[in-house]
Image (cartoon, rainbow, N blue to C red):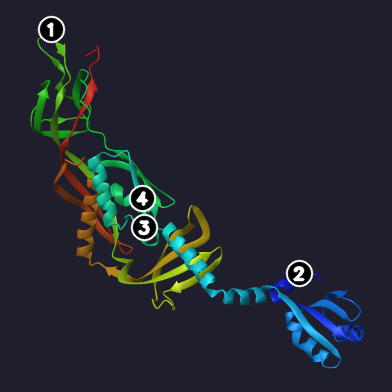
Amino acid sequence: MKNQWVTFLGGKIHVKVEGNGVERFINQLTRSHLLIWNVKRQGEKAITFYIRLQDLNKLRHQARKFDCRVSFLSGQGVPFLWKRTLKNGGFLTGLILFFIVITMLSNVVWGIDIKGASPQTEHQIKKELNNMGIQIGKLQFNMDSLESIQHELTNKVPNITWVGVDLHGTTFHLHVVEKNTPKTKKPKSPRHLVANQKAVIVDMFVEAGIPVVKVNQFVNKGQLLVSGLIGREEDQKPVAAIGKVYGKTWYKSDVELPLQSDFQVFTGKEHKKYTLKMGSLSIPFWGFGKIKYKEYEKENNVHQIKFLKWDLPIKYVQTTVREKQFAQRDYTKDQAISAAKELAKNDLRAKIPNDAKIVDEYVLHEKVEHGKVKLSMYFQVIEDIAEAKPITQGD
């Protein structure tokens, strides 16, 4: 038999034929194109051979024409193995249940190891992990990805700079880098305070050094504001000038805003599907049916299924389908100008220091062109304009 695997899958039978004229019976089987192999004589009136399980009825039909006794010695192949397995159904069921239980336990969180964190920070991290559903005894299938967990912890635990999240087997390993407490400031070297841009002085708070400008005075970029040389001219002593000098500065901003714009929003409706993925084969087991949403966005959350410490070639995929719709926003000219002003302000706030204040604004130029509002804005800002400049021998 050339293809043993095909025969094993389909099944084969070991046959014994006894009686007179067994040779004529074998010849008849051959003429009937019935496949037989491993033909062996067993004494003078008996022959054994193999046939395919699918040819059993043909063999019986031919046997009725001859004075021979046909007996079946054994059956081999998948159909017979399956039949024997069904007879021992309890063992098979126990084996399957054992595999399922071990697989489920291999995908449960059994440990959370946090390194590099103080007891207080570790308590906060465990509290946030609890809120995210990451607890000992929970299945890993419904948990967020490692990147999402890392992002959430970094945002919600205030006193950590970075956290690395790894999953080894059934244990989460977290490596934490805490924010350093401010170190004692080193003594500053002798320096002046000079203006970092053009401004009109509105207020001053000087802790060390001698102010050389006054309120309401206009200063240019680089002009001396607070001197770091104190004492008489013949006996001056250099110190580190410390203080804040607030000045009124000016900024110009040009913005464009379309009168009509398209955007998309989520409606809040969603549908979840669950799939087992083996290579390129996907087997859905929950969330059947077609997606009814006209416009939607898919998000896949993939979890590797483990058996003890090994990764099985099976993945559990949770697919969330969220409905979205497109909308159009139309501005009147006045609405577009108001929105453009706010856009210009937000753009300016991103550029100036956090403690700076916008005190006044002017529209220098506005026009509607090609479906867009174009604005030129002028802003007055009060901010600290002082920057340090080291004292040199020339000073």
Can see residue 213?
no
Q: Quadrant of the C terminus?
A: top left
| Disc 3 target residue | 144
The circle drawn on residue 235 is 1
How far is mark 4 from mark 1, CA to CA? 70 Å
Residue lying farthest to the bottom in this orientation: 65
Amino acid tagged 2: Gln
Amino acid tagged 3: Asp
How far is mark 2 from mark 3, CA to CA? 48 Å
Among the two numbered marks 3 and 1 on one chain, the one whose residue lies closer to the N terminus: 3
| Disc 4 target residue | 111
Q: Quadrant of the N terminus?
A: bottom right
Q: Quadrant of residue 140?
A: bottom left
Amino acid tagged 1: Asp
Dot 1 and dot 2 residues touching (CB under 8 Å) = no
Could you tell me which secondary element the residue under label 2 belongs to?
A: helix
| Disc 2 target residue | 4
Q: Please identify, in this view, whether the residue under mark 1 or under mark 2 is nearer the observer.
A: 2
Residue at position x 49%, y 64% from top? 99
